[in-house]
Image: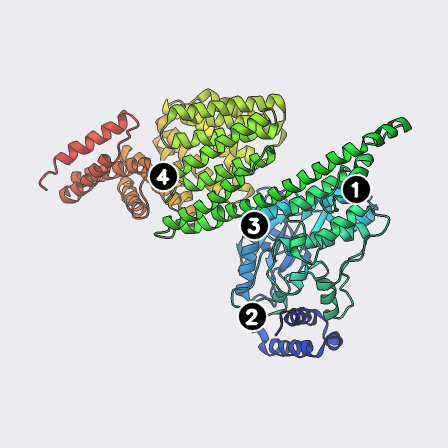
């Protein structure tokens, strides 16, 4: 069967499935004979399959008034092939908030529905943009998977524009926000695949929200030849589908660009250019694949018609290369500049210049005409430069997509694959080669230089990831050298540009962190100081909350590099001032909590009661964050760290009972984090450390439970050592655990097992070269003294 025929079959099958029984025959009668035969065969197979094609919950499911997780369903607000959406509110009394909850619908293969649902959750989790509906929570309750999303009170895009009779400029401003949202999705390697006005809401304040990523980037499994149910055959809306979608071909970013063009046409003209409704399916498909859209109404400028036609070109290669290019052309039109969609003729360039610069008198007009030839030549050169810049940006966009694929998709999977380090190195080197080629053509564009700098720093993060196998410090040094060379060029070109100064702060902070990991304290402190100085300059050039936050982060990095209580307190003061403006901002809450934690650490080292107060403030802030998203592993870890610090604070002031209580809470939460992701080596390391601290506190208090927790710590550290090389802090803690177990067994008369533990402790202390203080040295000496009594045993 040809691709075109199969596309027609799956669309007709879906329509027949949705049609009332009395209208199905009329629906089939309009189909070509070959298409009708296939559809009738599929309908017969579906009808004879009975409940086999239905998921277990298809006959019923949650309804208004039901409780899903922490939420009570209020009323149904939407339904599609993928799922049903309810308006809901929290029912656990923690706080009141209305949300939208999406549940898997019944008419799917259950396994396929769950795969799509989980994929939508993963997509929404990586998208963070003001014009994309946010995912707040997710989970399973009573056998139903659900997503909790931001509840958007708004109208569909077309209805919003028509109800207010918005002028063209206002409609273009809304479309800008849509392009910006899709651009963010594409940068995160997400293709929406169903862009249409119905999936775009506009709030009463005029804020755009793009919805429904349920079919985003969901291709059929390799080797599959036909979907199995009506719901699964439709991964598009025909009125907004691209030719390649209509033909059933693989979907790329270019398909989303085409759909954006259709949406813009409908916004401007008030009608859909493809208009497949009430047409036979084969006619509708032919219109989409072969017929050019009608011209926009004559009252609209030619520039807008050219832009729509470029976006809706039948050949994907002739469309805009990215959503950001489309967005840039909208901006050019709104500011009266030449658009790239138009042929750059001399007459056109001159006319756009005159429109932007209307002279107030005939004398001025005459002067303009006398200068026109020279200005037109200048504009022509400018247009050529614009095209070259657009080409360079397009090539860099390809490189950036490659980098994102290597860093965020392929590399994490290869990290856990035994023997994959050489393959990781090859892939990183390929990415590096692409970047180096782009660097040769960087020119003097500050925005392009900033993109290159950020890409080199991100690449260095992968090359030097210390949490697993890495491809070598030399590669990290080379990437960072390229970043710093480009940074010097950037600051020479744009010494007071706010975005360039912010990029410099970012690079200095990373350089400081990287030097600190290598133990180069002085260099780390120098880079951190450069970051603070640059951040202060940034605030002077452009005051504002965003740049104040940059300064606070730079102070925080400097405090860590220089072990400076004063710098932590300065950073905290800025975080708290910003929280006064945005009391519920998750990033600010976490930053302030981190500052409190670090300040608490200073006081705990000095056995001062202020440490308990600071640790308590950090715990309060992090619990607020966890309440916003109870399943967020990062928020859970932050609370677990706070509980551990509360335990250390109470231990420092001599309250062993409360120290042990908070240590137990920390262990329980870390165990929960590890259970959710058993392959996470860092989670295992953190749990082993927390378990050992609980055991140490119990041993110091002389409690019987100490031995059980020491044995648990021993088991966790041995498991960790079998999977990775132990970092120095873990070696120290493991050695202390073995020492205490050895002493315990010897006191009980178990000399053989006790000596085995002591020999293990001695081996670990010999492996650990970096002692942090006199207490570490004392423990090592105790291990050697106890071990000496085991000689010959």
Residue depth check, mark 4 versus mark 1: number of the one nearer the observer:
1
135 over 55 or under it: above or below:
above
Label 3 vs 4, first from the N-terminus: 3
Circle 3 Cα neighbour tier, 10 Å, few/some/many (<14 / 14–19 / ≥20):
some
Q: Residue furthest right?
A: 362
Image x and y of residue 692, in percent: 31, 39
- Residue receiving disc 1: 348
Label 3 vs 2, first from the N-terminus: 3
Label 4 vs 1, first from the N-terminus: 1
Q: Are marks 4 and 1 in contact (CB under 8 Å)?
A: no
Image x and y of residue 648, in percent: 37, 31
Disc 3 and disc 1: Cα gap in Å?
Answer: 36 Å
> Is 537 on the left or on the right of 716, as rendered?
right
Find residue 189 and name its label.
3
Circle 2 Cα neighbour tier, 10 Å, few/some/many (<14 / 14–19 / ≥20):
few
Image x and y of residue 518, in percent: 36, 32
Report the front residue among 518 and 625. Answer: 518
Report the front residue among 364 and 700. Answer: 364
- Residue receiving disc 2: 225
Disc 4 and disc 2: Cα gap in Å?
Answer: 52 Å
- Residue receiving disc 4: 690
Q: Secondary structure at mark 3?
A: loop
Label 4 vs 2, first from the N-terminus: 2
Residue at 72% over, 63% down: 290
């Amino acid at each position: 069967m040809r691709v075109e025929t199969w596309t027609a079959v799956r669309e007709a099958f879906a329509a027949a499935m949705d049609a009332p029984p009395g209208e199905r025959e009329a629906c089939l009668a309009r189909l070509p004979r070959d298409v009708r035969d296939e559809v009738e065969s599929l309908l017969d197979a579906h009808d004879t399959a009975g409940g086999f094609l239905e998921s277990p919950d298809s006959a019923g499911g949650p309804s208004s008034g039901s409780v899903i997780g922490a939420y009570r369903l209020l009323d149904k607000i939407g339904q599609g092939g993928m799922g049903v959406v309810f308006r809901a509110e929290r029912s656990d009394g923690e706080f009141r908030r209305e949300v939208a909850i999406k549940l898997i619908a019944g008419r799917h293969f259950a396994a396929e529905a769950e795969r799509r649902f989980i994929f939508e959750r993963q997509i929404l989790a990586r998208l963070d943009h003001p014009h994309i509906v946010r995912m707040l929570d997710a989970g399973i309750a009573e056998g139903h998977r659900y997503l909790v999303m931001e509840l958007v009170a708004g109208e569909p895009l077309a209805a919003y524009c028509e109800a207010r009779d918005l002028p063209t400029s206002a409609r273009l401003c809304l479309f800008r926000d849509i392009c910006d949202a899709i651009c963010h999705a594409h940068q995160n390697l997400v293709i929406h695949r169903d862009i249409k006005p119905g999936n775009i809401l506009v709030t009463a304040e005029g804020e755009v929200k793009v919805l429904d990523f349920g079919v985003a980037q969901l291709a059929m499994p390799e080797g599959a030849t036909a979907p199995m149910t009506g719901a699964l055959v439709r991964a598009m809306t025909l009125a907004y589908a691209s030719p390649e979608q209509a033909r059933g071909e693989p979907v790329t970013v270019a398909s989303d660009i085409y759909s954006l063009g259709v949406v813009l046409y409908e916004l401007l003209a008030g009608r859909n250019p493809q208009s497949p409704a009430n047409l036979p399916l084969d006619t509708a498909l032919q219109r989409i694949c072969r017929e050019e859209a009608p011209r926009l109404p004559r009252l609209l400028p030619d520039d807008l018609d050219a832009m729509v036609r470029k976006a809706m070109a039948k050949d994907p290669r002739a469309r805009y290369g990215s959503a950001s290019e489309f967005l840039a052309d909208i901006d050019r039109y709104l500011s009266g500049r030449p658009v790239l969609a138009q042929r750059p003729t001399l007459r056109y360039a001159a006319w756009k210049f005159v429109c932007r610069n209307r002279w107030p008198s005939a004398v001025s007009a005459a002067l303009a005409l006398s200068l026109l030839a020279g200005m037109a030549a200048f504009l022509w050169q400018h247009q050529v430069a614009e095209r070259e810049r657009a080409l360079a940006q397009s090539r860099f966009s390809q490189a950036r997509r490659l980098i994102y694929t290597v860093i965020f998709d392929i590399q994490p999977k290869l990290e856990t694959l035994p023997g994959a380090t050489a393959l990781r190195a090859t892939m990183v080197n390929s990415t590096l080669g692409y970047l180096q080629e782009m660097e040769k053509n960087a020119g003097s564009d500050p925005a392009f230089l900033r993109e290159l700098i950020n890409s080199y720093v991100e690449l260095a993060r992968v090359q030097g990831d210390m949490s697993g196998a890495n491809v070598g410090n030399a590669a990290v040094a080379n990437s960072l050298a390229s970043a710093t060379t480009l940074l010097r060029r950037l600051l020479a070109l744009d010494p007071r540009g706010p975005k360039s100064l912010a990029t410099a702060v970012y690079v200095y902070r990373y350089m400081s962190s990287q030097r600190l990991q290598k133990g180069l304290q002085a260099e780390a402190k120098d880079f951190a100081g450069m970051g603070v100085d640059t951040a202060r300059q940034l605030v002077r050039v452009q005051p504002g909350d965003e740049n104040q936050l940059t300064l606070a982060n730079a102070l925080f990095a400097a405090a860590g590099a220089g072990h400076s209580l004063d710098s932590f307190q300065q950073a905290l003061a800025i975080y708290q001032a910003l929280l006064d403006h945005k009391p519920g901002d998750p990033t600010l809450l976490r930053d302030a909590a981190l500052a409190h934690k670090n300040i608490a650490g200073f006081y705990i080292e000095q056995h001062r009661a202020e440490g308990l107060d600071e640790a308590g403030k950090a715990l309060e802030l992090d619990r607020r964050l966890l309440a916003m998203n109870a399943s967020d592993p990062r928020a859970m870890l932050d609370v677990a760290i706070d509980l551990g610090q509360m335990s250390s604070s109470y231990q420092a002031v001599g309250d062993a009972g409360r120290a042990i209580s908070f240590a137990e809470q920390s262990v329980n939460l870390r165990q929960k984090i590890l259970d959710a992701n058993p392959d996470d080596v860092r989670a295992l390391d953190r749990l082993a450390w927390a378990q050992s601290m609980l055991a140490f506190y119990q041993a110091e208090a002389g409690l019987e439970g100490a031995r059980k927790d020491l044995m648990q710590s021993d088991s966790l550290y041995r498991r960790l050592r079998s999977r990775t090389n132990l970092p120095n802090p873990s070696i120290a803690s493991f050695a202390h655990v073995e020492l205490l177990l050895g002493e315990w067994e010897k006191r009980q008369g178990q000399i053989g097992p006790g000596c085995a533990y002591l020999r293990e402790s001695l081996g670990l202390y010999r492996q650990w070269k970096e002692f942090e203080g006199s207490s570490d040295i004392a423990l090592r000496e105790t291990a050697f003294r106890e071990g000496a009594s085991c000689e010959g045993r």
